[in-house]
Amino acid sequence: MKKIFALAFTAAVLVSCSKEGYTISGDVKGFEDGTKVYINKQDENGFTKIDSTEIKGGTFQFKNDKAPEIDIYYVELGKTQEFAFPVILENGDIKFSFDKEKPESTKVTGTKNNDLMTSYNEEAFKIQKEIMDFQQQNQTKFMEAQQKGDQATMQSLMEQMTKIQEKYVEQNKKFISTNKDSFISLLLLTQLSMSDAVTPEEIKTYFNDFDKSVKETKKGKDFADSLKKMEEAEKDRQKVAIGQKAPDFTANTPEGKPESLYKNLGKVTIVDFWASWCGPCRQENPNVVALYNKYKDQGLKIIGVSLDKEQDKWVKAIADDKLAWLQVSNLKFWDDEIAKSYFVEAIPATFILDANGTIVAKDLRGAELEAKVAELLK
């Protein structure tokens, strides 16, 4: 399943305005007079308060003769951060409205950037509601299928969910394509670049098409630097691309015996990255056990590479899940050298190798995995 980001809007747009400075005029319901209102800047340390005022008669106002560097800020109502909302600080008169009884009706408007943010959120919330409705309607069905081991039903439901989630990607692609002078597009592209929803070439193309004004912002320059690093990393990733020889490795079994990949190749070999603490891995293990039992006498081998940290938990998971194939681990969690050499950034992750150790497929599950194994064993 693709890793798809449901993008809660955290972005800003670059635009020139005739008015210097900004005002934020708030109209809020459900708060007592005297309630503090803050403007926060978010960084790696959390929220930093840069200005404050108070609610009087259901309204508040911030005013500054000069807008800071354009970016995302947050208006916080009260001190708990329960009510904190993104606002783009830019030149112009910004209108903020919020009703504690109807939080979904929150709007930030009045300037081009904030108008774009609000319209984007309205579309995103529709997709979010569709996802929540689907989950609510099918939760019982999925749990029943899981208890029965009904892989077909589970797979079907997951595929339906993925199709709904992909609407986020399409929304973001459309926005980026039609708002090339928008800082929002840059931030959305940054989010997309962290998923596998777009290819590195698509990312590069989108960025190159941006208006010069976007590229020359601080975040634009930072993204250009990260793009160069991404391109370099992609060259390294080609070492484990389909069609390449799988990197050899050696690690210890639970008994402390060193075993290598190439000394244990079968007609088909699955290198399975997993861990005892990984819920999706453990859920998938019964399917892998069934596959192994069905094809092991025909030449299928599996090598489990665990990203565990604790020996006892690793060993217990092997026994509990009845994993009868070769298991190795360096017990280094995400610092595992094997995972790094295969560029594994999420688990479960699988690499399917032919008899020569060539990578022929990646990350297959269920029926797709069995079909590939059966094909290679013919």
Image: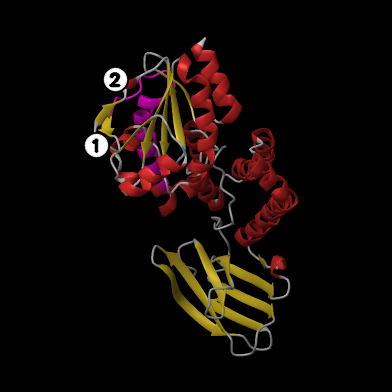
97 versus 196 height, above or below:
below
Residue 355 is situated, as x and y percent measured from the top left of the image, at: 40, 14
The residue lying toward the viewer, choosing from 190 and 89, is 190
Q: How many marks?
A: 2
SS category of the residue bearing label 1: loop
Q: Residue at x 71, y 50 (%)?
A: 140
Q: Residue at x 27, y 33 (%)?
A: 251
Tell which tag, 1 or 2, sits nearer the viewer: 1
Q: Is residue 368 magenta?
A: no
Query: On the image, numbered disc 2 is attached to which residue?
Result: 263
83 versus 141 height, above or below:
below
334 versus 36 height, above or below:
above
Q: Amino acid at mark 1?
A: Gly
Left or right position of 168 against 375: right
> Can the viewer see residue 248 in this picture?
yes
SS category of the residue bearing label 2: helix
Q: Residue at x 56, y 23 (%)?
A: 370
Residue 144 is situated, as x and y percent measured from the top left of the image, at: 69, 45
- The structure's colour scheme is secondary structure
* Span of residues in magenta: 223-249
Q: CA distance from mark 1 to mark 2?
A: 17 Å
Q: Is residue 236 magenta?
A: yes
Query: On the image, numbered disc 1 is attached to which residue?
Result: 256
> Can the viewer see residue 66 in this picture?
no
Residue 55 is situated, as x and y percent measured from the top left of the image, at: 61, 85
Quarter of the image holding residue 93? bottom right
Judge the density around disc 2: few (<14), some (14-19), many (≥20) Cα neighbours within 10 Å: few
Left or right position of 86 against 28: left
1 or 2: tag closer to the N-terminus: 1
Q: Amino acid at mark 2?
A: Lys
Magenta-drawn stretch, dominant element (helix, strand or loop): helix
Residue 188 is situated, as x and y percent measured from the top left of the image, at: 54, 48
